[in-house]
Every structure is written in structure tokens, then in C-alpha cells.
Amino acid sequence: MPNAPKPGFSYDGKTLTADGLPLPKLAERFGTPLYVYSGPLLRENFHRVRRPFASADPMVAYSVKANSNLAVLDLLHREGAWFDIVSGGELKRVLKAGIPAERAIFAGVGKSAEEMRAALRAGVMEFNLESEQEAERLADVARSLRRRADVAIRINPNVDARTHKYITTGKTENKFGVPLKRALRLARRIAEEMPALNLAGVHCHIGSQILDSSIHPNVVAAVMAFVDEVERETGAKLETLNFGGGYGIAYERGQKPLDLRPFARALLPELKRRGLRLILEPGRSIAAAAGLLLSRVEYVKPGDAKTFVILDASMTELLRPALYRAHHEILPVEKRAMPSGLVDFVGPVCETGDFLALDRESFIPSEGGLVAVMDAGAYGFVMASNYNTRPMAAEVLVDGGEAHLVRKRQTLNDLLRLESIPGVRDGAKGA
Ligand code: LLP
């Protein structure tokens, strides 16, 4: 196609569009706050992450927690994704999206017996184990169902991923994974004492939003040494090596997304030599840039030190700025001559931590105007809450040149449906 536009969000003249569809039209049609995803960009991102590892035919297991909308799961399934799930709820979503359970890998530090049962019955591909206690529980559950579970031990290699401390997972002080010495003991126990478990692989995920391209290559040797040791000590032949996700994206101007090539260069020959199948678990690098949060300006409130732009979106739609002080670019949906200055973009929630951007040198939109909070496609909607009794936003997927409502806006009745007042018929007194 000559001059095919780049997939995703770009200005057509002065108006920001989602794959050519003007965002003001979407705001009118679906209301705000609104999550808007680009199907073409989701696809492009999936293949961009896969490409450096393509010669190993990796299983790219999209990390469902990043954006679990059924339409997103379906789209990625069609591209050939596998799925990394961390709860019975995510398993249900994958199944609801028509994805066979064999394409799902079940991870997480706190799997309940019930979740294990559901996953075993459905037939997930593999469980990532995070402790000896969990291995014992899974062995019990598998035995009672007369099944055998394929497992990988998640190791904690004690490395610093140099990212936000809430999303660092590969250090001794983090709750995730099994320290190497214990992991070897666990491998031996599984091989010798737990016939209901089949030790199939090793798993390692050291953190999220990693931007330093030397971090992943630096753990390759330690992980491989562990694989060799397990094979030597247990006589087992491992089949899979799961290296997790965590590939950072450029949220801020001037940042560069993680370059995956050094990682692929370090990893692929080692895999080949051992005949291991590679599993990767990217979430953010596929979904983040493929989504934005569209919001309308309720008020522009001048202050003595700065201007407060009060949006109809808040920490209940996008928690990342409040929780991690994360940076998201905020763009005007209609470019026009606007004043500029020091701005806090905040929401209506009664909480000082309710901001989407703080002390930002920015355009100052006017009341009723629209802004786009960028890179909100991962860890956006999925972390939403109903705080202040705010209904959850709608989600739209733009694909094939059309906007599809892939999650309706929650209504106040939806939100209140599960509550009741004791002794009152129908649970509530008023309308
Ligand atoms: N695999 C495992 C075992 C994980 O724990 C995670 C993320 C991933 C894969 C996917 O990581 P990604 O490729 O998306 O970086 N809410 C935080 C991020 C939490 C990440 C949790 N685990 C945020 O908004 O930055």
C-alpha cells in the first residue's frame, strides 16, 4: 500500500486520530473517560517483540494482566500468541475469548487450590511454581484429579533490574521466585517425590519496565547454569525456558524503548545448544502504546503557583501516576493556539494523590476540551477501581477502520448490584 499511515495514534491536520478515526467523534459517540485501543498497533507491537527471537520460534505468551479485555486477547490469539495468566479470573477470560487452555501458562505466588483445580481441568500448558509449598499443593490437587501437571520453577536470581521498586521482582527481598539453592532442592524433590508433577522448565522474570539493555543478557548465564545443574542433579530433560517479560517502553520524550537484540544474541545460542523451547511473557511492550485514555476537561482552575486542569478521568481510570509517580504524556486532541504554563492534570477524586500529571510544563486546554493520556493501553483499565463510586470507563477497539465498543461503560446500577441492606426487600430502599 502506498503511504500506508503508521498504525496507532497520530494527528490528521490538527486532530488526534486513532488509526484515522478522529478522537472527538469517538468521545461524542461513546462518552468520556474512554479507553481507546489500536488493533493495528497491538499487532505491530506483538510482532516487533517476537521478531528478534523469531529464529527460535518462541512462544510469545502475552501477559494478560497488562490488558485483559476479551477483544485484545482474541486479537493477539489470532496473531499466534500464547498467554501468561495469574488467576482463575484470567483463565476464565482466556477461555471466554475462545483460546484453548493449552495456550495458557499459569503463574503467580498465591494460586489457590481451587484455581489449580480449574486450571488442571481446563488443561493449561504449564504452571510456574513460586515455592515448595505451592509445589506440594499442586501435587495434591493433581493427584486428586488423577492428572499430571507440567511445571516450571520460577527462580529468583537476585539481580537488580534498575526499575521502580514496586515492579522489581528478581531480588532476594522480593516475594517472587525461589532463590537458586532452594530451587535446586525443589527440583530434586519434584523429580524424586512428586510423580504428579513433571518438571518441564525454568522460569525467570526479574521486573517490569526495564530500559537497560544489559540487564537481561546479564542473567542469561546464571539461568543457564541453573538449567544445567537441574538436569545434572535430577536426570530430567527440561523442555522450556521462560524468560518472563518486562521490556520497557518510552513513556517520556527522550526515552528509548528497551533494545531486545542484545538479549536475543546472548540467549538464542544457549537455547539451541540445550534444545530448549523459549517462552516470553511481554505485556506492556505489546499493549501500552496501543492504548490511550481520552478525557474531557471539566474545569480549568487557576492557582497561585500553577493551573489545575480538572479532568473527568482520574486515578480510578489510570492509577499508575498516583501509585508509581509514573509519567504519561498528555496531548491535546485538537491542536489550536492555547496558553501554556505549569499544570497539574488532576481528576475529580477526593484524594491529593489523584493526579495524572504533576507540575507539567504544558498547554492549558479550555473547559470542555479533550485531552489524550498516552501509553495507557497496559496497566490502565485493568487497575481501575470504583473509588468514589465512579463507574468504570468504556473501552473501544479501533480495527479495520472501525470503532468497536469492546466494553460498555459501567452503570451505577451495575456497580451497586451486588450490595444489599439487611432485612430490606430487593436489597435497597430507593431508586
Ligand atoms: N511475567 C511476569 C511473571 C510478571 O510478573 C509480569 C508483570 C510480566 C510477565 C509482564 O511484564 P511486562 O512485560 O508487562 O513488563 N502495574 C505495573 C506493572 C506490574 C507488572 C507485574 N508483572 C505498572 O503499571 O507499571
Image (tube, rainbow, N blue to C red):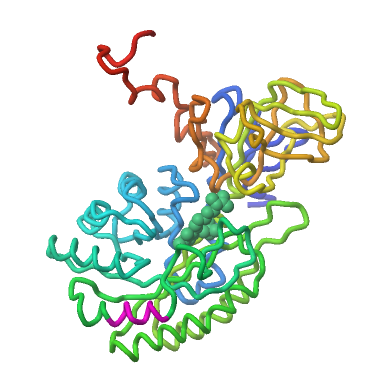
> Which secondary structure type mostly characterizes the magenta part of the structure?
helix
Whether 237 is drawn above or below 326: the answer is below
Whether 133 is drawn above or below 18: the answer is below
**Residue 43 visible in the snapshot:** no
Does the stretch in magenta take in 160? no
**Residue 298 visible in the snapshot:** yes
Residue 186, quarter of the rendered image: bottom left
Rendered residue at 56%/23% (across/down): 29
Rendered residue at 82%/26% (across/down): 303
Rendered residue at 38%/55% (across/down): 85
Is 65 in front, or is 26?
Answer: 65
The span shown in magenta is: 181-188
Q: Identify the image quadrant of the C terminus.
A: top left
Is 130 in front, or is 361?
Answer: 130
Seen in the image, is 410 located left or right of residue 342? left
Marker count (numbered): 0
Residue 191 lies, in percent from the top left, at 25, 81
Seen in the image, is 56 located left or right of residue 35? left
Is 324 in front, or is 237?
Answer: 324
As drawn, which residue projects farthest toward the top? Answer: 430
Residue 291 lies, in percent from the top left, at 58, 43
Whether 195 is drawn above or below 62: the answer is below
Residue 411 lies, in percent from the top left, at 44, 22
As drawn, which residue projects farthest toward the bottom? Answer: 232
Residue 324 lies, in percent from the top left, at 62, 49
